[in-house]
Image (spheres, rainbow, N blue to C red):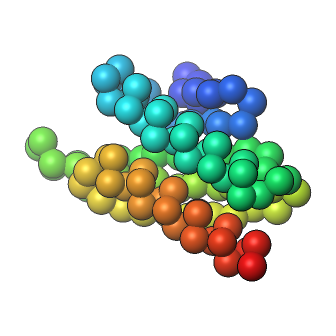
């Protein structure tokens, strides 16, 4: 089995994105990168964000994307997941769920 992990710097790890075309990956990397900068501002002890993608219910041209994200800070893990037919919507949703968790955690 080949390694399909993509590391973006020291704090972002993507897994399962090997079938995504390069144009979409550019957008995905920018979306995630800008959100991680926001997370780092919100949580001083931010360590790493791991995002796992899996395509499910693939029929013909239709597919749903399942995204799982783990935000690691101070040795603790916050999880979020989302499922949608639009990859960008799914990623935005999972990042938004993490942001809401951070806001609750830091209150």
Is residue 89 visible from the viewing direction of this image? yes
- The residue positioned 58% from the left and 63% from the top of the image is 98
Judging depth in this view, the residue of 42 and 60 nearest the camera is: 42
- The residue positioned 46% from the left and 41% from the top of the image is 31
Residue situated furthest left in the rendering: 60
Quadrant showing the N terminus: top right
80 up-or-down from 71: above or below: below
Instruction: Residue 53: give x, y in percent of width and height.
Output: 46, 45
Quadrant showing the C terminus: bottom right
In the picture provided, is 107 more to the left or to the right than 94? right
- The residue positioned 32% from the left and 54% from the top of the image is 89
Judging depth in this view, the residue of 96 and 58 nearest the camera is: 96
Residue 71 sits in which quadrant? bottom right
- The residue positioned 88% from the left and 57% from the top of the image is 74
Instruction: Residue 95: give x, y in percent of width and height.
Output: 51, 56
Residue situated furthest front in the rendering: 41
In the picture provided, is 7 more to the left or to the right than 66? right
């Amino acid at each position: 089995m080949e390694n399909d992990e993509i590391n973006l710097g020291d704090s972002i790890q993507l897994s399962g994105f090997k079938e995504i075309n390069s144009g979409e990956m550019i957008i995905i990397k920018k979306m995630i990168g800008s959100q991680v900068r926001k997370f780092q501002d919100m949580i001083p002890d931010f360590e790493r964000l791991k995002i796992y993608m899996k395509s499910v219910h693939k029929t013909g041209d239709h597919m749903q994307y399942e995204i799982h994200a783990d935000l690691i800070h101070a040795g603790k893990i916050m999880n979020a997941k989302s499922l949608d037919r639009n990859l960008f919507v799914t990623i935005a949703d999972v990042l938004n769920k993490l942001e809401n968790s951070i806001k609750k955690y830091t209150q």
